[in-house]
Amino acid sequence: MIIKLKKEAIELLENLIITPSFSGEEEHTALLIEAWFKQNTIPFQREFNNIWAKNKYFDENKPTILLNSHHDTVKPNKAYTRDPLKAEIIDGKLYGLGSNDAGGSLVSLMATFTYFYKRKDLKYNIVMLASAEEENSGPKGIRSVLPLLPEIDFAIIGEPTLMDLAIAEKGLLVLDCYAHGVSGHAAHGTGDNAIYKAMEAISWFKDFRFKKVSETLGEIKMTVTQIDAGKQHNVVPAICHFVVDIRITDAYSLAEVLSMIKENVEVEVKERSLRNHPSSISLDHPIVRSGQKLGREIYGSPTMSDQTALTCPSLKLGPGESLRSHTADEFIYVKEVEEGIELYIKMINEII
């Protein structure tokens, strides 16, 4: 059965590659995922372009594992030398947009779910979710579906990790900051320059260090990434706007970080969202121990995924390599997908 699932998973991945699925435009890849479930006689549900299914003998009295990956892609960058929507296998590499991020993980998890679907003796329920709008954190992605799913006890999020165990992931807090001054004529030196006020706050963001450091994710990182002020060379600006990108670790909540910032800077601070939470899973969790038993390494991930929407323990794990994501001539090794299916099945078998 595993050999058959590997073959069909690669075929599905090739079809996903040749089918455009930019974030918010995943209608056609959603149909391919539906076709997989129909082919395997698995009932499924759909909300927008998110498709999910439960194992055949789902029991509300059992804890539930969520298997999740996304089927949307970013748009190809201009450095591509190949057709990004053409699936080609050359020297064991399957080329194409979304092959690595996160098509390989998605089809591997779908094959794994199908493998366990008819098992009667499971200690856990299993829910498979192929989500949309992950790349743009869109409103019709995973957050639109979570209220419709059974209660989740822990999740495996399929993203390229070389099948090592990303046991923690940084969250994201984006701030719009406004320094307010008084306009005046530059020649007369009148007014109160908002840029200078902004510089003081920017210096604080540059130099401040949070006391608590995460064992897996290290320090919180704050970076000023945009700034805008002034319309004329001879007018002292009354307002200076700048943006701060903050990567939050599991040592603090987003609300705690925001509160500390507001206490320390003398500018107006507006958060864009408080929903992109950091995530983690205990080293003692059975799924982590299962992966370590199979020789997989553990680490903390600096990149974001649909984990930010979850409140349950979650593990990021999948075939492919994160550094290939969003690059020109994206690819995944066929062997990585095949081994990914094997490892997912072995890890879950160990606890289930």
Image (cartoon, rainbow, N blue to C red):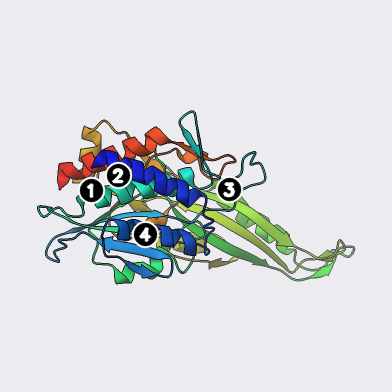
Quick one: label 1 or label 3, which is nearer the N terminus?
Answer: 1
Q: What kind of residue is marked 2? A: Leu
Q: Can you tell which of label 1 and label 3 is closer to the viewer?
A: 1
Q: Is residue 74 above or below residue 86?
A: below
Q: What kind of residue is marked 4? A: Ala
The residue beneath circle 2 is 5
Q: Position of residue 262 (x, y in %)?
A: 51, 64
**Mark 4 falls on what kind of element?**
helix
Residue found at the far left of this picture: 121
Left or right of 88? Residue 216 is: left
CB within 8 Å, label 2 to label 3: no
The residue beneath circle 4 is 35
Q: What kind of residue is marked 1? A: Tyr
Q: Residue at x 60, y 49 (%)?
A: 76
Q: Is residue 88 above or below residue 131?
A: above
The foreground one among 140 and 18 is 18
Q: Quadrant of residue 197?
A: bottom right
Quick one: label 2 or label 3, which is nearer the N terminus?
Answer: 2
CB within 8 Å, label 4 to label 1: no
Q: Position of residue 141 (x, y in %)?
A: 43, 65
Cα distance in 3D space between marks 4 and 3: 51 Å
The residue beneath circle 3 is 206
- In the rendered structure, find residue 115 and report the number of the disc placed on it: 1
Quick one: label 4 or label 3, which is nearer the N terminus?
Answer: 4
Q: What kind of residue is marked 3? A: Lys
- Badge 2 density bin: few <14, some 14–19, many ≥20, Cα 10 Å: some
